[in-house]
């Protein structure tokens, strides 16, 4: 905070103040757990979300579970999802699975319409937290690199994270294997699905660095071809 007062430009002073606050939050002790939290953690290795960060972490954990099940599970539904060509149908599947895994800790309402008439693919709510987490879902095969970058910036961030309550968001990409590379038009560089995720992660990190009002954007990629590829090998 003292350093922020030494900076010559107001924007720089404000930015340093935001970073100082974030550092203080990370260093501070969390709220004391209730007895119910201890019991819940002992039984299920998780507790009720009590902050926007808790809810975001829980949503990311659920998506990680779905990724593991689709990519490596014995009863994986990846072959079925590879034939789904409409994102609306894929969104319905993910909404259903997230509801089944909710355990009463969050809700996934039907597609919500915001004040500007836009509709996030998924929006996760928790009973005691007024900070919904939007999830923007894309079938990666259907979009170019520049289109995905634009959707990250203008759709997830520009529209769905415009709500002052929402500090965290998820950009969920599902790859069906019909497209094998994405190209950056400015440099001509080409990316496979894994490198595409890394590029978008870099974009998300840059957004967080330059936005004082946002705290986290997670890029989640699910490879529906992974199980078939492993079996062939």
Image: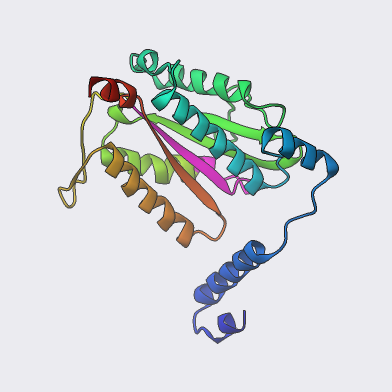
Is 33 drawn above or below residue 181 in the view shown? below
The residue segment tinted magenta is: 159-175
What residue lies at 50% left-to-right and 18% top-to-bottom? 93
Is 27 drawn above or below residue 229 in the view shown? below
Give the residue at the far left of this rendering: 188
Q: In the displayed structure, does residue 199 sit left or right of residue 192?
A: right
Q: Nearer the viewer, residue 233 or 35?
A: 233
Colour scheme used in the picture? rainbow
Give the residue at the far right of this rendering: 35
Q: Nearer the viewer, residue 203 or 41?
A: 41
Does the stretch in magenta take in 202?
Answer: no
Location of residue 180 in the rendering, given as x and y in whole percent from the top left corner: 21, 31
Give the residue at the far bottom of this rendering: 6
What residue lies at 23% left-to-right and 20% top-to-bottom? 232
Residue 117 can be seen, yes or no = no
User: Which quadrant of the figure contains the C terminus?
Assistant: top left
Location of residue 124 in the rendering, given as x and y in whole percent from the top left corner: 61, 33
User: Which quadrant of the figure contains the N terminus?
Assistant: bottom right
Does the stretch in magenta take in 160?
Answer: yes
Q: In the displayed structure, does residue 144 sit left or right of residue 5?
A: left
**Total numbered circles:** 0
Q: Nearer the viewer, residue 131 or 32?
A: 32
What residue lies at 47% left-to-right and 44% top-to-bottom? 218
What residue lies at 65% left-to-right and 68% top-to-bottom? 24
Residue 154 can be seen, yes or no = yes
- Residue 82: quarter of image: top left
Q: Nearer the viewer, residue 70 or 87?
A: 70
Q: In the displayed structure, does residue 181 sit left or right of residue 78?
A: left
Location of residue 5 in the rendering, given as x and y in whole percent from the top left corner: 59, 84
Is 193 drawn above or below residue 10 in the view shown? above
- Residue 68: quarter of image: top left
Location of residue 90 in the rendering, given as x and y in whole percent from the top left corner: 44, 20
């Amino acid at each position: 905070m003292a350093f922020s007062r030494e900076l010559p430009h107001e924007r720089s002073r404000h930015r340093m103040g935001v970073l100082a606050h974030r550092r203080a939050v990370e260093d501070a002790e969390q709220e004391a757990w209730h007895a119910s939290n201890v019991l819940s953690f002992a039984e299920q290795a998780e507790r009720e979300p009590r902050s926007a960060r808790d809810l975001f972490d829980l949503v990311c954990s659920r998506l990680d579970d779905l990724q593991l099940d689709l990519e490596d599970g014995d009863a994986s539904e990846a072959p079925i999802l590879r034939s789904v060509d409409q994102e609306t149908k894929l969104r319905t599947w993910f909404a259903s699975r997230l509801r089944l895994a909710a355990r009463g800790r969050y809700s996934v309402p039907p597609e919500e319409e915001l004040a500007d008439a836009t509709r996030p693919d998924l929006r996760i709510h928790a009973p005691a937290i007024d900070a919904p987490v939007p999830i923007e879902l894309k079938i990666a095969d259907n979009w170019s690199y520049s289109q995905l970058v634009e959707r990250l910036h203008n759709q997830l961030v520009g529209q769905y994270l415009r709500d002052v309550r929402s500090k965290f968001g998820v950009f969920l990409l599902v790859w069906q294997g019909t497209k094998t590379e994405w190209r950056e038009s400015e440099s001509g560089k080409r990316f496979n699905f894994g490198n595409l995720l890394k590029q978008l992660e870099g974009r998300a990190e840059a957004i967080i660095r330059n936005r004082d009002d946002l705290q986290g954007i997670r890029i989640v990629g699910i490879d529906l071809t992974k199980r078939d590829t492993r079996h062939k090998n």
